[in-house]
Amino acid sequence: METTSEEITALVGREVYSNNGVFVGEVEDVRLDLDNQQVTGLALHELNPELFSGYVGDSRGVLIPYRWVRSVGDVVLINDIIERLRPREEEGADEVVV
């Protein structure tokens, strides 16, 4: 996916929703792979407390993999986050980083 620096900075402040229409949070920052010149993750804050209760503790946000992004427009749509969350003892490569 080709993106320009203007498109990357435009992600900051956008609301993020699951593909089921559930508010997830707001983009605070983006994680970049400078060697490959691509976005690899979105740092979210202003999280939906119903989704993240018991998962984030004192953290201010979460980092989600950019591969979860389905589309970007006025809002960012991601794969259903609820299906991805699991207890810490079951941590895996696709889990949300807090």
Image (tube, helix red, strand yellow):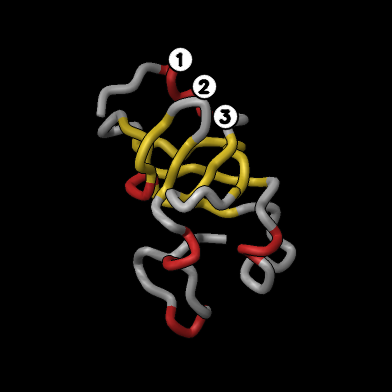
Residue placed under numbered mark 2 in the picture: 10
* CB contact under 8 Å: marks 3 and 2: yes
Q: Amino acid at mark 1?
A: Glu
Q: Residue at x 59, y 45 (%)?
A: 44
18, above or below 49, in the image: above
* Left or right: 70, with 56 as reference point: left
Q: What mark, if any, has residue 94 been given in the picture?
A: none
Give the alpha-carbon distance from disc 3 to disc 1, as whole Å.
Answer: 11 Å
Characterize the local packing of mark 1: few (<14), some (14-19) or many (20 or more) Cα atoms within 10 angstroms.
few
Q: Earlier in the sequence, mark 3 or mark 1?
A: 1
Instruction: From this view, report whether residue 73 is shown above or below residue 98.
Output: above
Residue bearing mark 1: 6
SS at circle 1: helix
Measured Cα–Cα span from mark 2 to mark 1: 6 Å
Q: Amino acid at mark 2?
A: Ala
Q: Which quarter shows the C terminus?
A: bottom right
- The residue that disc 3 covers is 12
Q: Are marks 2 and 1 in contact (CB under 8 Å)?
A: yes
Q: Position of residue 17 (x, y in %)?
A: 52, 45
Vertical relation: 77 (above or below) 81 = above
Residue beneath the point at 43% across and 49% down: 19
Q: Position of residue 79 (x, y in %)?
A: 39, 53
Local packing at callout 2 (Cα closer than 10 Å; few below 14, some 14-19, many 20+) is: few
**Mark 3: few/some/many CA within 10 Å (<14, 14-19, 20+):** some
Which SS class for mark 2? helix
